[in-house]
Amino acid sequence: MARRMSQDATGRVLGPKTARHRRTSVDNPEPPKRHSGFSADADAATSTVRARGELDILTVDLLWGTIDVLVRAGHLQITLDLAEVTSIDSAGVKLLIALQHSLTTHAGELAIINACPAVLDVLQRSQVAARPTLTE
């Protein structure tokens, strides 16, 4: 009996177990939607991290890693500028809570600034606004 193998979009051969769970172009004729670009950059001089795009389950690791670099360098008063963040999901909210907890255990602080109204609403509803310093 021949084993059925398939390839992903990059041409990597997938085993039968992986291929079974993967949708093919026959099953789903629409191309997968690309996730909006997310980026975060840190300014070590001011301990400010500027995030852009959607802060969600697909992007939280990037933001965590960017802030972690600052913390490991000894910066414990972090300012997170969300002016260019267009949306946030529960993973993003959980990340902000975890960051605040991590910083406060090391006598630090997370200040969130410039959140757009939609993001600010999510933060206030999830009570993140009560944890880190949050300015409009």
Image: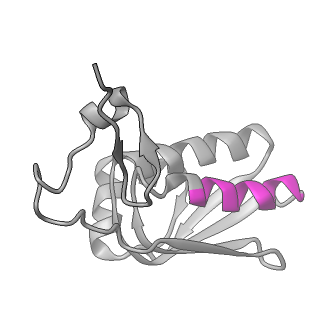
Residue 16 locus on image (x, y percent): 34, 29
Question: Which region is colored magenta?
Answer: 62-73
Report if residue 76 is visible in the image: no
Give the total of numbered labels: 0
- Residue at image position (89%, 57%) is 74
Residue 78 locus on image (x, y percent): 70, 63
> For residue 53, what is the image quadrant?
bottom left
Q: Is residue 72 magenta?
A: yes
Q: Nearer the viewer, residue 68 or 25?
A: 25
Q: Tell me which colouring the rendered structure shows.
A: one colour
Magenta stretch, overall SS: helix
Please give left or right for residue 77 compared with residue 50 in the image: right
Report if residue 27 is visible in the image: yes
Please give left or right for residue 120 compared with residue 59 in the image: left
Q: Which residue sits furthest front? A: 1
- Residue at image position (31%, 36%) is 19
Q: Nearer the viewer, residue 70 or 16?
A: 16
> For residue 110, what is the image quadrant?
bottom right
In what quadrant of the picture does the C terminus appear? bottom left
- Residue at image position (67%, 55%) is 65
Residue 107 locus on image (x, y percent): 79, 45
Q: Nearer the viewer, residue 82 or 2?
A: 2
Establish if 17 lies above or below 32. Answer: above
- Residue at image position (28%, 51%) is 125
In what quadrant of the picture does the N terminus appear? top left
Establish if 15 lies above or below 72. Answer: above
Residue 13 locus on image (x, y percent): 44, 45
Q: Is residue 18 magenta?
A: no
Q: Which residue sits furthest right? A: 74
